[in-house]
Amino acid sequence: MEPAEPAVAELQAALAERDRVIAELLARVAELERRLGQNARNSNRPPSSEGYDKPAPKSRRRRGQRGTGGQPGHPGTTLCQVEEPDRVLVQRPRRCQRCDRSLRRARVSSVERRQVFDLPELRLQSTEYRIEHRRCRCGHTTMAALQLSAGWALAEARCRVQCNRTRIR
């Protein structure tokens, strides 16, 4: 027996069904493309949802205004290390970082100097940290861990001023 040919009405119904499915799929693609084009600026999503796709920050300065950093002709100032600090605290490594041996009798291979400047009530006080580097018998050089005062946390080489929100002129 030969298969019966489908009637024209059945073919038209099948085509109409396919047209309906195609229209639904096109609408879904359009919706997904619209969603894909959204970001925190053109939707109600928070800025944190952008992840690493955030736009580069834009400067509000107009051309011709001053550039970043120190301006030409401005004298720069910096705090330099002093030869005779008020206090010298020597930081010695106790144990080798590689083999955990005691470094008490090991020779000092080098010393690193770092100075912190604090402004107490009336006089500038400088502290120099001498961080010893000691060479172990195994050949590894270990640097002492810094045991720092509270002033170190603010900056390594910056002056700290405590003035209780008053201006000194």
Image (tube, helix red, strand yellow):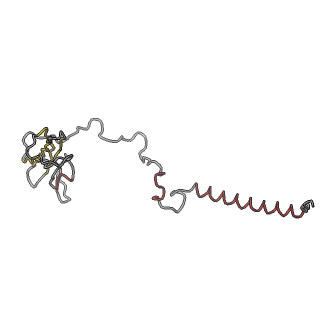
Residue at 7 percent of width and 48 percent of height: 87
Residue that lies at the very extreme toward the top in this rendered image: 73
On the image, the x and y values in percent for residue 154 come to 21, 53
On the image, the x and y values in percent for residue 6 come to 89, 61
Residue at 10 percent of width and 55 percent of height: 121
Numbered disc total: 0
Residue 11 or residue 85, whichever sits in front: 11
On the image, the x and y values in percent for residue 77 come to 20, 40
Residue that lies at the very extreme toward the right in this rendered image: 1
Q: Quadrant of the N terminus?
A: bottom right
Q: Is residue 59 left or right of residue 123?
A: right
On the image, the x and y values in percent for residue 28 come to 67, 60
Q: In this view, does 22 lie to the left or right of 31?
A: right
Residue at 51 percent of width and 62 percent of height: 45
Q: In which quarter of the image is residue 134?
A: top left
Residue at 14 percent of width and 38 percent of height: 110
Q: Quadrant of residue 143?
A: top left
Residue that lies at the very extreme toward the front in this rendered image: 1
